[in-house]
Image: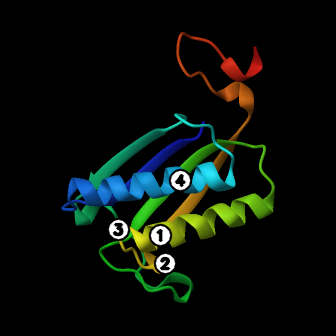
Amino acid sequence: MPLVRIDLLKGKPASYKKAICDGVYRALRETFNVPEEDRFIVVSEHEAENLVFSRSYMGIARDDDFVVIQLTVSNTRQIEQKKALYAKIVALLGEAPGLKPGNVFINLVQVTTEDWSFGNGLAQYVM
């Protein structure tokens, strides 16, 4: 855990997408104590008509570099850890690939530990 889903508009180079994946993973390691090699990330690219977002909701400016980061995580973190995660992701993605803070939309989906199987048909967290 976690499972990370990243959605963005088509057209970015592989290095840009890798920088986003690396930044999110680093933030998870530093704030959520995610173990090394616990890296499961899906990147989906969309045509403009298939990634619909407000360019000004809540007074936050967004442009075509908008990215949605949805993380499915176990429901074991406190609110301070979540806030730290959000801030760390935005800071790291500001460094590389250079995203503006307003273009980073983050959503956590929390599940229980028995909701994970990492392979072999087993619920590894509840054995």
Which residue is denoted by mark 2 in the rendering? 101
**Against 25, is 60 above or below?**
below
Which residue is denoted by mark 3 in the rendering? 97
Say whether marks 1 and 2 touch (CB < 8 Å).
yes
Mark toward the viewer: 4 or 2: 4
Spatial CA distance of label 4 from label 2 is 17 Å
Specify the amino acid type for callout 2. Pro
Report the front residue among 33 and 67. Answer: 33
In the rendering, at what x and y percent does residue 18 appear? 33, 52
**Against 40, is 98 above or below?**
below
Can you tell which quarter of the image residue 86 is in?
Answer: bottom right
Of pointers 4 and 3, the one earlier in the residue sequence? 4
Mark toward the viewer: 1 or 4: 4
Specify the amino acid type for callout 1. Val
Of pointers 1 and 4, the one earlier in the residue sequence? 4
Mark toward the viewer: 3 or 2: 3
**Secondary element at image label 3:** loop
**Against 118, is 108 above or below?**
below
Report the front residue among 34 and 108. Answer: 34
**Secondary element at image label 2:** helix
Specify the amino acid type for callout 4. Arg
Spatial CA distance of label 4 from label 3 is 14 Å
Which residue is denoted by mark 4 in the rendering? 26
Of the 4 image quadrants, the one containing the N terminus is: top right
> Colour scheme used in the picture?
rainbow
Spatial CA distance of label 3 from label 1 is 12 Å
Specify the amino acid type for callout 3. Pro
